[in-house]
Image (cartoon, helix red, strand yellow):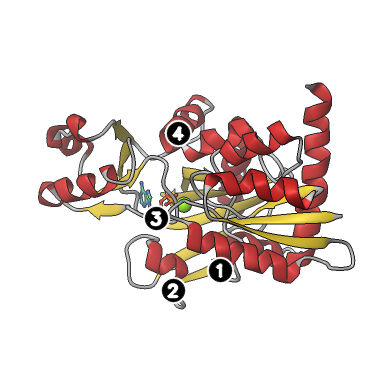
Amino acid sequence: MKIGVIMGGISSEREISLQTGQEMINHLDRSRYEVVPMVIEQRVDLIMQVQQAGIDIALLALHGQYGEDGTVQGALETLGIPYTGSGILASSLCMNKQLSKTLLKAGGVNTPEGLCWQGMNDYDPQVVERLGYPVIVKPNTGGSSIGIQLVQNEKELLSAVQGACSLDQAILIESYYEGTEITCSIVDGEVLPIISISSARSKWFDYKAKYEVGGAEEKVVELPTVIEQRVREAALASYRLLQCKVYARVDMILCQDRPYVLEVNTLPGMTANSLLPKSAAAAGITFTQLLDHIIASSLHERKQEWRMA
Ligand SMILES: Nc1ncnc2c1ncn2[C@@H]1O[C@H](COP(=O)(O)OP(=O)(O)O)[C@@H](O)[C@H]1O
Ligand SMILES: [Mg+2]
């Protein structure tokens, strides 16, 4: 089977995507697959490269815009080339934190209180005052914590909002939920061991904590049965409500024993330090087996979807 590993891309998460792609290339079973690395520099590269190579499936190592947001999935659907992970709708929904939160709330899943502004014209410190400090300001469609800031008071608000607005058309302002940060990896509707994250130097999981060596301690966490059950239910409900397929990772804060979902990642990081492979390893699944599974399950999923079309 000929596998195109699609990586790089044009989003702010390009560097992480290159690492994800490299890690996938290192672990793909060469006795089963012919591996074609495909580094995307500009949008048009995808179509030219996949057509030239004549691949059987696109293994998506992209993150963020034009990769995780349904656009690449749409292009591949149009070309009739199967790809890994969630389909177009789930990909674009999960990229939009505000829309995801609206659907999660409607489906009974807890998510932090907050508001959404469509740019600087909506700037109104009084509304934030009512929400109460501290707040977290984030670009609505960002990733890898880029452009996110913890804001302690009104003095810090303007520059944080300006920063997030420079990266996105819409921004989210959420109450800061103090608690234990956890993440739930789901593969084919199964929740893998839950991982807790404690950032070494920060009150939240910022870019440095995510990607610098020693930036955060991430370990499988044993929760009391009742709480573990709540966490698993929230993760699975989020996965289903947002129509995710094959695999995803649900980020949450456990606050006063209740999980609050921050977001669902449809193409979570798969670098050497990433959380989903770590969680899989704790369940006895090697990186190579994880890739086998993602590929087989994605082929099955696309076949089902395309049969109905
Ligand atoms: N409402 C919140 N309360 C506390 N911490 C938050 C909140 N929202 C985000 N964070 C922190 O910011 C990090 C990144 O936020 P997240 O919404 O997952 O965006 P990204 O797509 O950049 O990962 C989280 O992992 C968490 O540490
Ligand atoms: Mg996150």
- Determine if the C-beta at disc 3 is less than 8 A from ligand 1: yes
Q: Earlier in the sequence, mark 4 or mark 1?
A: 4
In the image, which disc is placed on residue 219? 1
Residues marked 2 and 4 touching at CB (< 8 Å): no
In the image, which disc is placed on residue 245? none
Q: Earlier in the sequence, mark 1 or mark 3?
A: 3
Q: Earlier in the sequence, mark 1 or mark 2?
A: 2
Q: Nearer the viewer, mark 4 or mark 3?
A: 3
Badge 3 element? loop
| Three-letter code, disc 3 | Ser
Residue pictured at 44% horizontal, 51% vertical: 143
Q: Earlier in the sequence, mark 2 or mark 4?
A: 4
| Three-letter code, disc 4 | Lys
Q: Is residue 143 left or right of residue 4?
A: left
Mark 4 crowdedness (10 Å alpha carbons): few <14, some 14-19, many ≥20:
many
Check disc 4 and report the residue beneath it.
101
Q: CA distance from mark 2 to mark 4?
A: 29 Å
Badge 1 element? strand
